[in-house]
Amino acid sequence: MIALQVNSYVKLDELQREIKRRFPDLAALTDMEQKRLWGSDSAELLYLWFESFANVLNQQMAKGAGLDNYVAVAELIKHGLMVGDDEVKRCIDVSFIENLFWQVAPEKAALYWAVTLPSLQRLYVAFHRRTPC
């Protein structure tokens, strides 16, 4: 997980760096998706990067990509919620979770929803008022 000093919180750029380190293939796809959608893959646009990251995961779900990678990503996002500063928590909520499962067929989403961690499910349902499947 992300290394922390005592009494410190993870910053948003640190979470992004950890995702890029642990999931380089997904991160590269995310950089391309961000550039496609927003015309830039600038590191300063972190909220948009996390939205693009959710879009890439949605594309992976639609293809039926393996659950192991998704579970590992969800664990890292949950860790960010637990140890992140307020900006990390806000970004996970509004840029990542709100966009997760967007336009994923319910039958495909069901596989991923079943392994989505409860803390992430609660954020999703709090915003959408329903599950994705």
Image: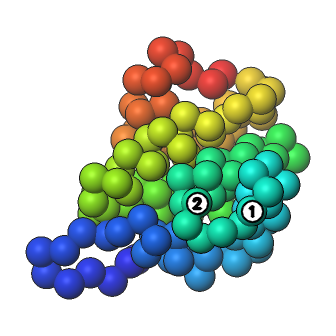
Given residues 94 and 65, the one toward you in this image is 94
> Would you say 42 lies left or right of 131 here?
right
On-image quarter of the C terminus: top right
Looking at numbered disc 2 in the image, what kind of residue is underneath it? Leu
At 61% from the left and 52% from the top, the residue drawn is 48
From the image, tell me which residue sits under label 1.
40
> Would you say 50 lies left or right of 82 here?
right
From the image, tell me which residue sits under label 2.
45
Question: What x and y, as percent, mark residue 110?
Answer: 67, 31
Judged from the image, the secondary structure of the residue bearing numbered disc 1 is loop
Q: Alpha-carbon neighbours of circle 1 within 10 Å: few (<14), some, or many (≥20)?
A: some
**Residues at discs 2 and 1 in contact (Cβ within 8 Å):** yes
Furthest residue toward top: 129
**Who comes first in sequence, dot 2 or dot 1?**
1
Question: What x and y, as percent, mark residue 124?
Answer: 48, 31
> Would you say 131 lies left or right of 34 here?
left
Judged from the image, the secondary structure of the residue bearing numbered disc 2 is loop
User: Is there any visible trace of residue 1 in the rendered image?
Assistant: yes
Looking at numbered disc 1 in the image, what kind of residue is underneath it? Ser
At 20% from the left and 84% from the top, the residue drawn is 5
> Would you say 25 lies left or right of 19 here?
right
Quadrant location of residue 90? Answer: top left
Question: What x and y, as percent, mark residue 45?
Answer: 58, 60
